[in-house]
Amino acid sequence: MRLPTEVEPAAVRAAAATDAASPAGSRWLDRLSREEINELLTLEDWRSWLSVAVNWGLVFAAMALVATWPNLLTIVAALFVIGARQLGMSILMHEASHRSLLADKRLNDWVGNWLAAYPVLADLAPYRPYHLKHHAKNWTAEDPDLLLATPFPVTRASLRRKIVRDLSGQTGYKRLLATLRRDLSMSAGKGGGQGLSATPALRGALATNLALLALLTASGHPALYLLWIGAWLTTYSLAMRIRAIAEHSMTSDPADPFQNARTTLAAWWERLLLAPNRVNYHLEHHLLMTVPHYRLPRMHALLRERGLLDSANVVRGYAAVLRLASSAPGPG
């Protein structure tokens, strides 16, 4: 049962369009009641605040682990946990871009930037139109994320090289240069010359990172900030790559909304290290993009219950995704 057009949220109207265009003719929205759709779209601010707190809490817990038992094993573990939480902050920025993080729009954007995007050198303002275009133009020539999906599958040797570049910091260094180019704009000086002008995103990144460094210094452990920078340059890159591969690569039918995005059923340790904030439910997110992250498991369960996921693009575990991503013939 569909919501009446005059009160129907934009996300539901978009879902109805993809529903009608589905080659499978599943009419999946008709399998959900008005009450179920309303439930899925209902925001509960406390749950988003909890996600923000858990993300930062895990960052500080990983740092505390190293401070208490400083050795190679705890440092490596902390780098992977922090890198995953940096991805988690990007996911919360993504949630804010859909205005499904917090009910108040201004607070939604403030939290999306200052507690999520800026600390990882991202910016909600340019990300929102970019990402909404991805939803509107998914798997078309105008999809800004198309180049993230189309190179796969590759050979195992190629995937290994990509992972080495991520964990050695090469990918992170390139991302840092691209971020600086984005956030440093040229402005005319008083004498007609050119000078560097920092964007709000760069000022926000500097302010939040200096605040983090100040907090760690006040706790007596300023060197722990190196874990934050080290993770951003290495494990964060790897987590982002695996996320991008899992979401849209190697799809069988780009025109079918149940095939052109993928949900990866993740174990608890994968949610900790690779799939924070329910980012693994990507098929559901594309079907109804303003469902808040904490309701995506419920949406998955409803679709499963109605038989809509029987032949959908759903896999179990990221190892299966990486095997598929490295399945191209070739050495290695």
Image: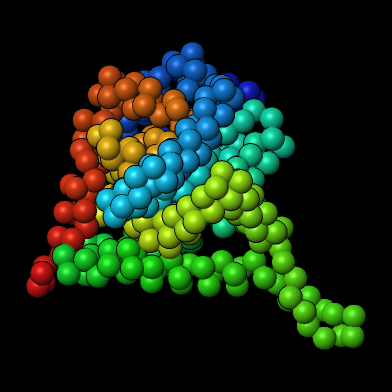
Task: Work out which quarter of the rendered image holds the N terminus and state it.
Answer: top left
Q: Residue at x 60, y 37 (%)?
A: 99
Q: Is residue 10 above or below residue 47?
A: below
Task: Work out which quarter of the rendered image holds the C terminus and state it.
Answer: bottom left
Q: How many marks?
A: 0
Colour style of the rendered protein structure: rainbow
Image position, residue 305 (x, y; %): 27, 19
Give 57 or 284, whichever is nearer the viewer: 57
Give 161 or 129, whichever is nearer the viewer: 161
Q: Which residue lies furthest to the top in this view?
A: 35
Q: Residue at x 64, y 66 (%)?
A: 183
Image position, residue 41 (x, y; %): 52, 25
Q: Is residue 33 left or right of residue 328?
A: right
Q: In this view, does 105 lie above or below 222?
A: above
Q: Which residue is drawn at 57% across and 57% down?
A: 121
Residue 162, image quadrant: bottom left
Q: In this view, does 272 lie above or below 176?
A: above
Give 130 or 190, whichever is nearer the viewer: 190
Q: Is residue 250 left or right of residue 132?
A: left
Q: In this view, does 42 lie to the left or right of 316?
A: right
Whether residue 74 is visible, yes or no, is: yes
Image position, residue 3 (x, y; %): 54, 21
Q: Is residue 106 left or right of residue 318?
A: right
Whether residue 289 is visible, yes or no, is: no
Image position, residue 181 (x, y; %): 60, 72
Q: Which residue is drawn at 49% across and 13% down?
A: 35
